[in-house]
Image: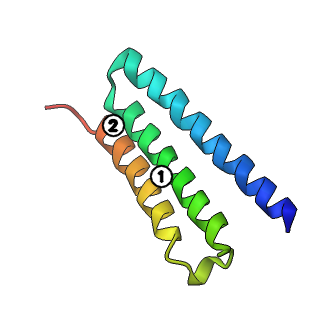
Amino acid sequence: MATIYFLSGAVTLGYMLVAMFFLRFWKRTADVLFLSFAVAFALLSVGQIVIASANIYVEDSSAAYLVRLAAFALIILAVWRKNRPSR
């Protein structure tokens, strides 16, 4: 069981590092795509914290996975906004 907690912490740390990475690029370029990615990865880390702290590892019966759905929807929306033709 300690291995699961260790790996959950490592995944959470990875999500937060990626969020800070994209936040740094957003500060440099002021591109909304980078901000969206930073928020999405921060949401993924919060979702991982909730899942690990509540001991819910069964994917089909957890409402905590809605946070992941929101993060991926945010990524899809940001990429769509970036690639749509400008008027």
For residue 54, side relative to residue 29 (left or right): right
The structure residue drawn at horizontal position 45% and vertical position 39%, both measured from the top left corner, is 37
Q: Amino acid at mark 1?
A: Leu
For residue 74, side relative to residue 60 (left or right): left
75 to 33, vertically: above or below: below
- Given residues 69 and 39, the one toward you in this image is 39
28 to 49, vertically: above or below: above
- Given residues 45 and 86, the one toward you in this image is 45
- Residue 61's image quarter? bottom right
- Residue holding disc 1: 43
In front: label 1 or label 2: 1
Mark 2, secondary structure of its residue: helix
In percent of width and height, residue 39 lies at 42, 43
The structure residue drawn at horizontal position 85% and vertical position 69%, both measured from the top left corner, is 1
- Residue holding disc 2: 83
In percent of width and height, residue 23 lies at 45, 29
Residue positioned most to the bottom: 61
Q: Label 1 crowding class (10 Å Cα cut-off): few <14, some 14-19, many 20+?
A: many
Q: Amino acid at mark 2?
A: Asn
CB under 8 Å between discs 1 and 2: no
For residue 32, side relative to residue 8 (left or right): left
In percent of width and height, residue 13 lies at 66, 43
4 to 77, vertically: above or below: below
Q: CA distance from mark 1 to mark 2?
A: 23 Å
In percent of width and height, residue 62 lies at 55, 79
The structure residue drawn at horizontal position 58% and vertical position 40%, both measured from the top left corner, is 16
Task: Name the quarter where the C terminus is drawn.
Answer: top left
Q: Which mark is residue 82?
A: none
